């Protein structure tokens, strides 16, 4: 199923990402194939550079680097947020980035296969899913950011745990209302952070 020579950690990561892909409607086999490819891509990025894909101390190293930590603290993160995010296996941290990119593509592709408007599907995704990245690198002229404003810019990926917990705590109707009020989930998240509710 996974091929020979895979560690238990690699298999667990593949299974976890496959389940997430199935949750958006990908069939089991396709989800498993995509998750396997995703994990293999991250391993191929990390291992040739001598980086241990299962290293769990990156957060301890990042929180003492002022150029890295200062903008994150200014955005409303805590040192614990950053440490917790980066002290997970690096395979998971970097595979999550690729998974979010894949989600964006798949949601639009599923809409295309169903004969729905792919522009509308893409816009719905931009409004209702968190978009993570470095907000300092956000480009309003990028084709994927058309129709968005500064408050809709990417949020640091270290917010992911807090955003997930907030969404579970407040429920779908609250999140939907916040998106309607602020325009996008990212703008709603920024408002919740500034009012200390997230």
Image (tube, rainbow, N blue to C red):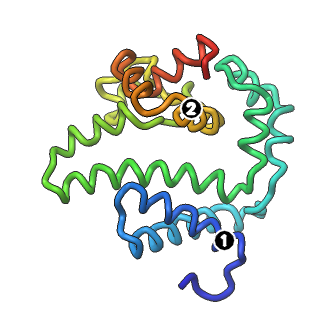
The residue located at (34%, 36%) in the rendering is 144
Q: What percent of the width, then of the height, locates residue 31?
A: 43, 68
**Height in image: 164 above or below 99?**
above
Between the residue at mark 1 and the residue at mark 2, the CA separation in whole angstroms equals 31 Å
- Label 1 neighbour load within 10 Å: few <14, some 14-19, many 20+: many
Does the residue at mark 1 contact the one at mark 2 (Cβ under 8 Å)?
no
Out of 176 and 30, give the one closest to the viewer: 176
Could you say which disc has been placed on residue 10 in the image?
Answer: 1
The mark nearer the N terminus, 1 or 2, is 1
Q: Residue furthest top?
A: 195
Q: Nearer the viewer, mark 1 or mark 2?
A: 2
- Among the 4 quarters of the image, the one containing residue 126: top left
Q: What percent of the width, then of the height, locates residue 81?
A: 73, 33
Numbered disc 1: secondary structure: helix
**Height in image: 48 above or below 116?**
below
- Label 2 neighbour load within 10 Å: few <14, some 14-19, many 20+: few
Could you say which disc has been placed on residue 1 in the image?
Answer: none
Q: For the C terminus, give its image quadrant.
A: top right
Out of 160 and 97, give the one closest to the viewer: 160
Numbered disc 2: secondary structure: helix
Please give left or right for residue 80 compared with residue 149 in the image.
Answer: right
**Height in image: 186 above or below 109?**
above
The residue located at (75%, 22%) in the rendering is 70
Q: Residue furthest left?
A: 115
Please give left or right for residue 77 compared with residue 195 in the image.
Answer: right
- Among the 4 quarters of the image, the one containing residue 91: bottom right
Q: What percent of the width, then of the height, locates residue 53?
A: 73, 62
- Residue tagged 2: 169
The residue located at (71%, 70%) in the rendering is 9
The residue located at (29%, 36%) in the rendering is 124
**Height in image: 133 above or below 117?**
above
Please give left or right for residue 173 compared with residue 192 in the image.
Answer: left
């Amino acid at each position: 199923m996974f091929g020979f020579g895979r560690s238990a950690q690699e298999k667990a990561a593949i299974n976890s990402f496959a389940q997430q892909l199935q949750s958006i409607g990908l069939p089991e086999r396709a989800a498993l194939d995509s998750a396997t490819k995703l994990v293999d891509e991250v391993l191929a990025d990390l291992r040739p550079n001598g980086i241990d894909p299962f290293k769990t101390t990156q957060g301890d190293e990042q929180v003492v680097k002022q150029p890295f930590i200062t903008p994150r603290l200014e955005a409303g993160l805590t040192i614990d947020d950053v440490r917790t995010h980066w002290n997970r296996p690096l395979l998971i941290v970097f595979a999550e980035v690729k998974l979010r990119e894949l989600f964006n593509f798949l949601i639009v592709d599923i809409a295309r296969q169903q004969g729905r408007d792919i522009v509308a599907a893409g816009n719905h995704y931009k409004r209702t899913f968190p978009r993570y990245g470095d907000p300092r690198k956000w480009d309003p002229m990028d084709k994927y950011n058309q129709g968005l404003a500064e408050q809709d810019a990417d949020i640091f990926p270290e917010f992911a745990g807090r955003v997930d917990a907030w969404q579970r705590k407040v429920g779908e109707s609250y999140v939907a209302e916040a998106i309607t009020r602020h325009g996008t989930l990212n703008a709603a998240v920024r408002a919740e952070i500034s009012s200390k509710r997230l």
